[in-house]
Structure formats: C-alpha cells, structure tokens
Image: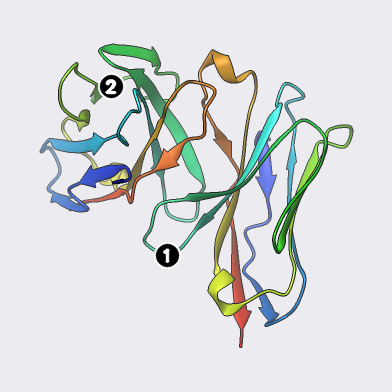
C-alpha cells in the first residue's frame, strides 16, 4: 500500500519562474493538506482541499500561490514568479476524512536561485 | 506569541536515558494533540495521538496532556540511537472544522550510543 507520493523530491528554480509541486494521496484518501517548512521552523499549514474543492486556504499567501485537487490526478501546489523566500520544504498530507489521521509525504525541497 | 511553543533543542542524551519533550500552547480550543517524528530529509510520521487530557502509552512512548496548564509532553523510555530525530508536537481544535494542524517548532533529539 503506497503512502503519500510527492514529486519532484527536489526542485530548483530561478527567481521569476514557476514551480509546480505534485501530491498523490494515499489510496482511498480524498482529503489533502499542504504545509511549508522553512529552515529552523516547524510546519506551517497552507491549504486544505477535498476533491475539486478548497476547504481552507487561510495559510496561503495572498499572491502567487494556488492549489487544486482535481477529480482525476494529483493535487498541485503552484507558485508563480518564485522569490528566494519561497525556498523551503513543502509537505503534503492526506487523510481519509476530516477527522482522521494525516499521513505525510516525503516532501518537495524547493530551492530558488 | 506563537500558538504553540516548543524548545528547539538540540537535546543530546546517552542511550538508555529517559527523554522528556514538551510543548505549551495558548489556544484553549485545542482538543486533539499529536506527536510526529521526522528523520532528516524525510516527512513527519505520526507517533502518538491523544484527545483531551490524560495519558496514553505505546511501547516506550508515553504522551501526556494537561489542558488546565496548556502543556503536553512526550516521554521516551530506554532511548535508542534510532530515536535520533526531530520531534514535532501538533494540535488542532474541532476536527470536523478542517483538520488544520498547528505545529511546534520541533525538538532535535540525538541519542548517543
């Protein structure tokens, strides 16, 4: 039973480029969460999605960041016009329901040059 | 003031020692409390999960929650070098309102053979 899958594991972008991070939840899970981990900091909630719906985006920066979880395919976290401050590890978690345990993926480490 | 405070360490102990990890929080609405373990360059994995106040034991691990003091602890008995990791406390309020987890900064633990 595969766990939460994230790709790419490492992503290097130059300032101004776009970054696309993908997350495939565990089989049977329809709830996806994205968190960001900056150096020397804990994980910070960004967004919570169910299939085709954004439930809570209170942790998302107002500009340049967007997320989706289409009916088919992985969840995508998209960062437009990246800046150096976007360099971080981005983790995706999934759960079977909103009251269920969240299982984390291995993360995508984004480096902005 | 951060919602969840956790001493970042690092904490270094000899093999076999009892380890005590702690978090304090300010939001009295938190009801669900978790401890995650994160190895270097990996995603967090759930160790312990407790609801409201009380103790929970699982093998060498014991989680305690004191809601009156807004204080949670994780104890590791007979610590092993394989326990060397960063330990993150996490908590959330009413689960069915979104499952958004609030994390502490994480405590880096090193168990020396």
Residue B54 in picture, x, y percent from top left: 84, 39
Quick one: which residue is furthest to the bottom in this view?
B113
Residue B42 higher or lower than B46, as above or below: below
Quadrant position of residue B92: top right
Screen quadrant of the C terminus of chain B: bottom right
Tag in front: 1 or 2:
1
Q: Chain of mark 2?
A: A
The picture places residue B21, in percent across and down from the top left corner, at: 72, 58
Q: Which mark is residue A63?
A: 2
Is residue B91 shown left or right of residue A37? right
Q: Left or right? Give the position of A99 relative to B39.
A: right
Q: Residues within 10 Å of mark 2 (few under 14, many from 20)?
A: few
Measuring 40% from the left and 52% from the top, which residue is drawn there?
B43
When the figure is inspected, residue B11 is found, relative to residue A22, above or below; the finding is: below
Residue labelled with disc 1: B40
CA–CA distance in space, label 1 to label 2? 31 Å
Which of the image's four quarters has the N terminus of chain B?
top right
Using the rendered view, name the quadrant where residue A35 is placed. Answer: top left
Residue at 16% across / 38% down in the picture? Answer: A19
Number of marks present in the image shown: 2
Q: Nearer the viewer, residue B76 or B91?
A: B76
- The chain letter for the residue carrying disc 1 is B
Residue B73 percent location from the top left of the image: 76, 50
Q: Give the class, few, some or many, for how many residues have Cα within 10 Å of label 1's Cα (few <14, many ≥20).
A: few
Q: What SS does tag 1 mark?
A: loop
Q: How is the image coloured?
A: rainbow
Q: Residue at x 24, y 44 (%)?
A: A6
Seen in the picture, residue A3 relative to B99 is either above or below; the reply is: below
The reply, left or right, for residue A82 in relation to residue A41 is left
Q: Which residue is nearer to you in this view: B94 or B108?
A: B94
């Amino acid at each position: 039973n595969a766990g939460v899958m994230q790709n790419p594991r490492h992503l290097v972008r130059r300032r101004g480029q776009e970054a696309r991070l993908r997350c495939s939840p565990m089989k049977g899970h329809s709830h996806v969460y994205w968190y960001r981990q900056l150096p020397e900091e804990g994980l910070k909630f960004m967004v919570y999605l169910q299939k085709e719906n954004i439930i809570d985006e209170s942790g998302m920066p107002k500009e340049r960041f967007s997320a989706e979880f289409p009916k088919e395919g992985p969840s995508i976290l998209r960062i437009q016009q990246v800046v150096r401050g976007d360099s971080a590890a981005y983790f995706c978690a999934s759960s079977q329901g909103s009251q269920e345990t969240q299982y984390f993926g291995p993360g995508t480490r984004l480096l902005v040059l | 003031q951060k919602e969840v405070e956790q001493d970042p360490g690092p904490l270094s102990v000899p093999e076999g020692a009892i380890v005590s990890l702690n978090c304090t929080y300010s939001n009295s609405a938190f009801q669900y409390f978790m401890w995650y373990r994160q190895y270097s360059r990996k995603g967090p994995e759930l160790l312990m999960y407790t609801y409201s106040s009380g103790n929970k034991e699982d093998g060498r691990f014991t989680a305690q929650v004191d809601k009156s003091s807004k204080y949670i602890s994780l104890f590791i008995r007979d610590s092993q070098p394989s326990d060397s990791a960063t330990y993150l406390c996490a908590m959330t309020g009413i689960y069915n309102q979104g499952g958004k987890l609030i994390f502490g900064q994480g405590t880096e633990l090193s168990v020396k053979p």
